[in-house]
Image: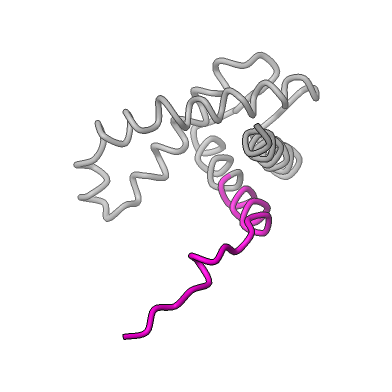
């Protein structure tokens, strides 16, 4: 349960940063922010893998750049499902998804402890 809460708070913080810094992404209340972060996590866990699979040929042809569009679509789907979470354009969805991912990566990356399996280097 603490892992879920950490991930949820990280996503909420990242979504708040995106709402604060991007004029095309808007979260109207703290309740909308809380619900939007849960829905965004659900969409990223359930819907996004299906989108990735369906758009794999486009992603390969564009050398991975189409993955940004898939992230924007998932972000837009989450915004469409949550009242009070607004994305004003497709480009705002792409940039918002990128910023949420970037902030989540920075915030979440520092909270993971280094374990013995990660710190161990095999020598042959």
- Furthest residue toward bottom: 124
Residue 8 position in % (x across, y down): 66, 34
The magenta span reads: 101-124
Residue 13 position in % (x across, y down): 73, 40
Q: Is residue 58 above or below residue 85?
A: below
Residue drawn at (68%, 54%), measured in percent from left and top?
Answer: 111
Q: Nearer the viewer, residue 24 or 12?
A: 12
Side (left or right) of 107 relative to 30 = left
Quadrant for the N terminus in the image? top right
Residue 98 position in % (x across, y down): 54, 47
Residue 39 position in % (x across, y down): 57, 23
Residue drawn at (62%, 48%), measured in percent from left and top?
Answer: 104
Quadrant for the C terminus in the image? bottom left
Residue 81: name its quadrant: top right
Find out whether residue 54 is within the magenta segment: no
Residue drawn at (64%, 56%), measured in percent from left and top?
Answer: 106
Residue drawn at (70%, 29%), measured in percent from left and top?
Answer: 26
């Amino acid at each position: 349960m603490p892992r879920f809460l950490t991930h949820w708070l990280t996503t909420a913080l990242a979504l708040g940063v995106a709402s604060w810094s991007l004029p095309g992404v808007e979260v109207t209340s703290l309740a909308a922010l809380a619900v939007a972060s849960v829905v965004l996590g659900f969409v990223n866990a359930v819907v996004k893998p299906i989108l990735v699979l369906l758009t794999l040929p486009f992603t390969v042809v564009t050398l991975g750049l189409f993955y940004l569009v898939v992230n924007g679509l998932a972000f837009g789907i989450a915004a469409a499902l949550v009242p009070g979470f607004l994305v004003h354009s497709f480009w705002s969805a792409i940039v918002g998804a990128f910023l949420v991912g970037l902030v989540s990566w920075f915030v979440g990356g520092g909270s993971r402890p280094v374990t013995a399996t990660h710190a161990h280097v095999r020598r042959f």
